[in-house]
Amino acid sequence: MAAPMKYFYELTVSSSPHDHGPNTTQTIMRDVLIALTPALIGSVFFFGFRALLVTMVSAAACVFFEWGYRKLMKLDSTVYDLSAVVTGVLLAYVCPVTIPYWCIIIGDFFAIVVVKQLFGGIGKNFMNPALAARAFLFSWPVIMNTWVKPGIQNWAGLLSTADAVTAATPLAAMHLGKLPDASLLDLFLGNVGGCLGETSALLLLVGGAYLLIRKVISPRIPLAFIGTVAALAFLFPQGNDRLTWMAMQVLGGGVMLGAIFMATDYVTSPVTKWGQVLFGVGCGLITIIIRYFGAYNEGVSYAILVMNACVVLLDKVGRPVKFGAPKKEAAK
Amino acid sequence: MAFSFFGGIHPKENKFYAEGQRVQPFPEPDVLVIPMQQHIGAPCKPLVKKGDPVTVGQKIGDNQGLCVPVHAPVSGTVKAVEMRPHTSGMTVMSVVIENDHLDTPCPDLTPRTPEEVDKLSPEELMNIIREGGVVGMGGATFPTHVKLSSGIGKVDTIIVNVSECEPYIVADDRVCQEYPGDVISGLQVVMKILNLQSAHIALEDNKPEAKRALLSEIDPKTGISVDILPAKYPQGAEKQLIYAITGREVPSGGLPAAVGCAVFNAGTCKAIHDAVYDGMPLVRRIVTVSGDIVMQPMNLMVPLGTSFNDLLDAVGHSQNPYKVLSGGPMMGVAQFDLNVTVTKGVNAVTILGAQNRFYVANPHCIRCGKCMDACPMHLMPLMMYQAERKNDLEELKALNLLDCIECGCCAYTCPAGIPLVQSFRTGKQRLRDAAPPRPAPAPAKS
């Protein structure tokens, strides 16, 4: 005789664990967006309101393409994980503030549809979408190489930068083996020409600190990246002032933005500890090689893209030794 | 000396629900269903048949080989010997006893004075422990006498596990607070069998009351020390605990004895004491009945064979249960039939409400690597998941899937909400299915 069923509850049965931590993909992406905000505020201050508009248009376009592609292909929607917003903001950050809207929207299409979704969507792409799109946008070299002189005068135009004064970036000077005109303080604060979101080392570091405190990123990649750039610049300076040269190489261009926000992109960076260190070192090394010997004066984005392609290999090298592995095996 | 093991997580402890509740005797149910499989190893064969009278502590099931007997917790009549649902999700041969509420003790039970115990040899003590039906009561239910006999001469460090890192559960905490003398006396029996002069009692730093109670009972001459570890899940996992106390790594696929350690749960020590001194076999255990929708969380001294339905009735719940777990939320087994009964390894029944629902229909791994940072076995859960999805058995082996302890840290921390542990269980089963059949075991001796 079977025991009588005393109650009937609709009990859910699943494999343990039955508890889940506070992190979701959405909270992580939200944290990244929060960390990117100081740099955006700085950009509006230096380059005017157009910086904000370009960023918002880019983010909106990315969300639209993400939504549209998933809808068209009858896949589950991944809009709510906010990863498309992050891609849109990052792409805006690595473009000049003067970029026409049609141009950045083409970039957004390339980033989301070609680089990300054609490979299977979030988590499957092997290249950083924002940086790959930036490389693609260099099909319009003039647009991508117009730099605005930062300053209050940009505020007058409010939304357009038609009257903006163009300026050379610090990297262009350094590419010729000279120290730029700007002071170190200007470079640190971001009061120099450059891409929309990359100029202010200070504000990017504030965002990076937030990500570290929230444990969104580990310091391994940024430290290895920035450390390698600093060490190589220190060892092979151009001009007399070794330390200033080193500081300029680290603070100028996209090293900070690249090291803190681009190279740490989960999907396109190694997951193993030693893989991450090697990844950062490789990024720094290629950055310096391109800056010193390349035809183009900025190397961060290409360095990261090249290293993106090495991730599988780096993760093989960095595979952790399991707990309780025989010590001899561990030594091999 | 305390080390911190790698990885791990800090889930919400939620111990406050049942922490302050004294252990209460559970009103003996009218009908008890006692499964013949309450330990790792060969299931017991029933020694009674329908209609037989039974007495408290009477042996009702036993077998040869890796096995410990099962006893009747109450006196009464055997109503049936049949297959009944078990907390593992299977049906298991069980003895159904109708309680006569007379509590007639079994005439074989023999209490012993400390002097008598002192005269017993290790072999005699181990036999008493086996006949007392003692198994590891932390959940693994490994026969204690086997752990002891295989540890003689190899073990130099005894660790009593009171880390109890699972959320909600406070059963071991309460055992140490309310029966510290029994725990220590059971531990001294273990020390005598293993011929060791020292032992560690490992507590997490969230159990100050248990620490105080134990310290007040410990005679400094006994060589027993209380080690406080920083609270972290899965501290209570045997390999992690051994590392935290001694810094030794149990080799992959090996037993703690390989690094000279033997770990015993606090409840097991009390069960050893009861079997050796009181002559009472393991027929009751302390169960924490808790959960976020429970009206009155309790720690209960429950006769084995009590159904989960009765426990749910005792504590009450404010809404329909969403999940009822045998164990805690990290490693507990979700039940679908509340007619299952408390066995030797059930340290808690956790009743969770619908607000614990967490399910992502199409999880997308974002390669954040948080699972790797959390894995106390230094594995690569995200790679193992991919290999399992592709059914790549070679790769699963190369990624050391079989070293996974299924603690759930990876799945807990995964922002994408991937059911990693479920995938690993599937993968392990596939590896087992694909393994060449083992050579037929030699016929058991004796």
Image (cartoon, coloured by chain):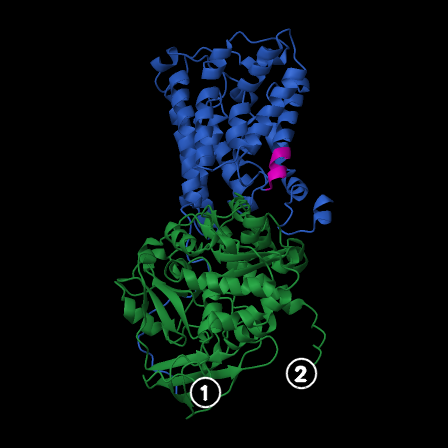
Residue type of the residue flagged with mark 1: Val
**How packed is label 2: few (under 14 Cα within 10 Å), some, or many (20 or more)?**
few
Residue type (three-letter) at the residue carrying disc 2: Ser
User: In the image shown, does A119 or A5 lie closer to the viewer?
Assistant: A5
Instruction: Give the position of the C terminus of chain B as an image quadrant.
Output: bottom right
Mark 1 — residue? B81
**Residue B327 place in picture, x, y as percent:** 43, 63
Residue B309 appears left or right of A233: left
Rendered shade, chain B: green
Magenta: predominant secondary structure element?
A: helix
Q: Residue, x 52% and y 48% (percent of image)?
A: B365
Residue that badge 2 annotates: B446
Q: Residue drawn at (50%, 58%), measured in percent from left and top?
A: B160
Residue span colored magenta: A272-278
Describe the element under mark 2 as helix, strand or loop. loop
In the foreground, B421 or B114: B114
Q: Which disc number belongs to residue B279?
A: none
Q: Toward the viewer: A199 or B266?
A: B266
Label 2: chain? Answer: B
Q: Quadrant of residue B318?
A: bottom left
On screen, residue A178 above or below A6: above
Q: Position of residue A14 (x, y in %)?
A: 44, 63
Q: Give the x, y percent position of residue A104.
A: 47, 29
Residue B44: horizontal and vertical position, in percent? 53, 80
Residue A61 visible in the picture: no
Question: Is A277 covered by the magenta stretch?
Answer: yes
